[in-house]
Amino acid sequence: MKKLLRNELLDHGAAVVGFACLKGHMSGEIAHLDRAVSIGVDRRLNEDTLALLVKLQKRAVRFLKSRGFRTLAIPPDSDRRKGTFISKLYSLFNHKMAATSCGIGWVGKNGLLISPDFGPRLSLVTVLTDASLEPDAPMEHSLCGDCVLCVQYCPSKAITGLEWSRSSPFVELVRLSVCRSHKKTKRLTEGKPNCGLCINICPYGRKDESGEKIITNGVTAARGDHY
Amino acid sequence: MVTAEKKQELLAKLRSAVIAYDEDTAKEASNEALAEGLDANDAIFNGLVSGMVEVGRMFESQEYFVPELLMCADALYAGLDILKPHVTQLDLGVKGSVVIGTVEGDVHDIGKNIVKMMFDVAGFTVYDLGRDVPLDKFVAEQLRTDSDLVCLSAMMTTTMTGMKKVIDDIRTKNPNVKIMIGGAPVSQDVADKYGADGYAKDATNALKDAINMVESLKKMKDEVEAKKKK
């Protein structure tokens, strides 16, 4: 069943699909939905990405529901969804936690989910379910290694350079207030809060001028062979 | 007019859409119901609400948990948004208005909102004060709107005590108002101790109690007026 669902999602535009068991990590209200299907889409940060994510999410929900399982779909922009009853529960859940738990990637020094193949260029959506899908191997440590490009390039010096690991997931990677005030200045001077240098600079999944990935074998690199 | 068969099919579809917390189907079925000329009241009460009643039962028997309950409520509202503009004046025998809110210091309003939804579909006029409502505001709002019913909600033992003050204040100003309380720490004992007229374990019970209360209130008023005439 897991293979079937994964293939269906990949066929319809998902870049990566992972399955995680989150038993013991969920707060009481959603504890019975302890499996997560994490779906990543190559980020273009436009309307299409969002629409595609929602479409994939609905597909996964239909797939699981039609087989008699429960689902709770956490939308991609969960923090912006207000006004529905269920939106109150979205804050109990974290897309990155699900994605690292199913081994899609790790949380990089820039505080973003980094996948070996796509770097920080994935947009995520999660479907929680009670279907007993066999979980993938979780990611235990950050694989950023010695790379500090994002730390150096951050215009507001918000990135602390600390590293994430599953055992200490709450270290302060990014001083959010600093990052936020930088974006605020940007909005005032340029009309848009866009920054995103820490995304652009990340060597994982980045392509050079000719369109080749600069880290070619993402998976081996991610296992530590690169550094 | 729709055939009986088609009607049953549409009602079943609305009902199961709520139970399966499927917003898309709830919307689709609601539009279909309107297109087929099904009475909107019928669609709401025998379709959507009948689904929600089943959801309430499943929640009580612990088949469904909080997330499912919330998603079902969202599906109901998705359908309700479409059907409501087409509703002809509801007549449940009682028409009441209600002031509802979560008391000062408390920001938990999921339960309150579900109770509010039940009042909405039942045709009550609802004055929702929201959450973290200053205690005086309940009293003022009741006087302003002359509501038959005041519903107080609290999720914490620390904020629960504020309800007693509201009840006392309203009683001194307007003894006829019925007051109902609810929330996790509230029990029948607490309701008795605080002098509330009703205690609601969940949204379905809240509605049943509320209708009973308003009915008895109306009866009381009628009796008083009848006496005056004599």
Image (spheres, coloured by chain):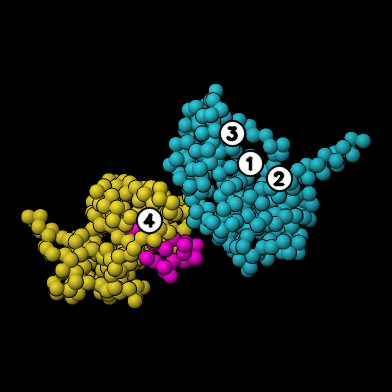
Chain colours: A yellow, B cyan
> Where the C terminus of chain A falls, by quadrant?
bottom left
The chain letter for the residue carrying disc 4 is: A
Judging from the image, mark 2 belongs to the subunit labelled B
Q: Are marks 4 and 3 on the same chain?
A: no
In the structure shown, which secondary structural element does the residue marked by tag 3 occupy? Answer: helix
The answer to whether marks 1 and 4 sit on the same chain is: no
Image quadrant occupied by the N terminus of chain A? bottom left
**Mark 1: amino acid:** Ala
Query: Callout 3 environment at 10 Å: few (<14), some (14 to 19), or many (20+)?
Result: some
Q: CA distance from mark 2 to mark 4?
A: 39 Å
Residue at 78% across / 42% down in the picture?
Answer: B218
Identify the mark at residue A30; answer none if there is no mark: none
Is disc 1 in contact with disc 2, using a CB cutoff of under 8 Å? yes
Q: Which span of residues is magenta-colored?
A: A21-38
In this figure, which residue is indicated by the disc labeled 4?
Answer: A127
Label 1 – label 2 distance at C-alpha? 9 Å
* Left or right: A192 as drawn, with respect to B128: left
Question: Badge 1, how many Cα within 10 Å: few under 14, some, many 20+?
Answer: many
Is the same chain shared between marks 1 and 2?
yes
Mark 3 or mark 2, which has the lower sequence index? 3
Q: Is residue A26 left or right of residue B159?
A: left
The first of marks 1 and 3 along the sequence is 3
| Subunit of label 3 | B
Image coordinates of residue B140 in percent, x first then y, are 68, 51
Q: Which residue is mark 1?
A: B122
Q: Is residue A97 left or right of residue B215?
A: left
The residue under the point 55% across, 44% down is: B51
- How far from the left and from the top, in percent, is residue B147? 70, 45
